[in-house]
Image (cartoon, helix red, strand yellow):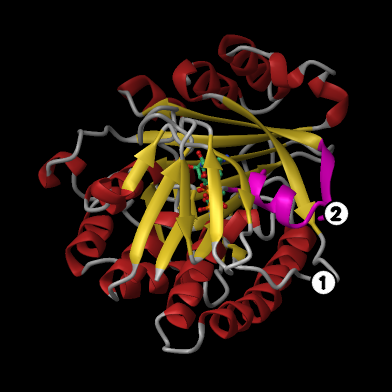
Amino acid sequence: MRVLIIGAGLAGPCLAHGLRRHGHDVQLFERDPAVDARAQGYRIHINDDGDAALRTWLPAEAYEQAVATSCIPGGVSMAGPDLRDVTGIELPPGVAGITVDRLTLRRIMLRDLMDSTRFGAGFSRYELPADGTVRVFLTDGSTAEGDLLIATDGANSGVRRQLLPDFHVTVQGSRLIYGRTPLTARARESTPRPALEGFLGVNGPDGRGLALAAQRFRRSPADFGLPAADDYVMWGLTVPSRVCGPRFFELGAADLLELAATTVADWDPSLSTLIRLGDAGYVVPASIQTSERPDSWPQVPVTLVGDAAHPMPPVGTSAGVAIHDAGLLASHLVSGAPLSDAVRSYETAMLDHGFAAVAAATRNHAGDF
Ligand SMILES: Cc1cc2nc3c(=O)[nH]c(=O)nc-3n(C[C@H](O)[C@H](O)[C@H](O)COP(=O)(O)OP(=O)(O)OC[C@H]3O[C@@H](n4cnc5c(N)ncnc54)[C@H](O)[C@@H]3O)c2cc1C
């Protein structure tokens, strides 16, 4: 079977490994010109479901490297803006998972897929010829034909826009500013201990919230022939709409860092210091989205996986759900069932699981991830 996958983020490469291992002809198309074209070295927590899918579908050596370069595990705590009363949180079952540097995991997954990955080839549109196949038009001017088109192109999926033009996404008024601060000696002094040793959520009473967590590599990616990466503190700040201003998405890195620092200026002073020490190359603005399960789903050789299928607020589950979807689709596609039956069975299970996760994330969203 010829499979075309759009998007080489987290779900796409995991799925590509699973399908290639079972003899399918896979081509992966990524809009970015290179794996590290944008600052993407964020700490990402992947829940148990996602971790299990990585373990099942990646080559054993790649999974071992993902674990070896993952973050030293730590606890989860919450505190108020003065950082005085820190409360440890007992994690519910299913969330222990694995915490990784996103770029390192992508490098590990893509290393063996370079011969079937085309960078700088964004999805433009697809056509459905009468013979039941699918033809994709890419932004580099090329086309590709396959038996199945799989979209793993993230929350703003272009494939979804064509497949499900009425798909409903709600964007909240609050915004997010994500950043990271290299763990220098000075930054270490400004990092609250629970964030150095795990994850700390700081919630203000007025819609402001800050999530902080150190990425401390168990082993350097350089030990596995990958570019070296230093430890850092990842932070994500929820900024209420009244603070963002209408030009939020046009702000440059320095202005975003300053907005983040001033948003928490009346909190414990270590927090604005830590933000001001942030790496301007890694600061990004983001919106908070949630989505509704569509009433109907077209029966065509095109399907969606991960954030493309079910954008949800950032509560630390969407990456795990995306990779779980990838594993679920791989298992249906290698089951020996006719292609259309396999895709329909996947979609039923994915929609149940994915939109249960959207509902839980929408309920739980409190500005942390
Ligand atoms: C800073 C930050 C921290 C996060 N932390 C967490 C966390 O701790 N836990 C968690 O569960 N989630 C977290 N998330 C969310 C998580 O990253 C996503 O849920 C997850 O990456 C979704 O995986 P995916 O494979 O569906 O899509 P993505 O990983 O978003 O990959 C989509 C890929 O498609 C490519 N693409 C997009 N459009 C096109 C196109 N037209 N043509 C070709 N390629 C295209 C993109 O360049 C990208 O490579 C975080 C997100 C951010 C931004």
Callout 1 amino acid: Ser
Quarter of the image for residue 123 reads: top right
Disc count in the image?
A: 2
Q: Marks 2 and 1, how far apart in space?
A: 10 Å
Split into 4 quadrants, where in the image is the N terminus? bottom left
The stretch drawn in magenta includes residue 364 = no
Q: Which mark is residue 296?
A: 1
Crowdedness near tag 1: few (<14), some (14–19) or many (≥20) residues, C-alpha within 10 Å: few
User: Is there CB contact under 8 Å for labels 2 and 1?
Assistant: no
Q: Position of residue 29 (x, y in %)?
A: 44, 45
Looking at the image, can residue 264 be seen?
Answer: yes
Q: Position of residue 58 (x, y in %)?
A: 29, 66
Residue holding disc 2: 166
Q: Residue furthest front?
A: 130
Q: Is residue 122 above or below residue 254?
A: below
Chain-order first, disc 2 or disc 1: 2
Q: Is residue 244 above or below residue 198?
A: above
**Relative depth, front residue between 11 and 225:** 11
Quarter of the image for residue 207 reads: top right
The stretch drawn in magenta includes residue 168 = yes
Q: Which type of secondary structure does the marked residue at label 1 adopt?
A: loop
Callout 2 amino acid: Asp
Q: Which residues are magenta?
A: 154-173
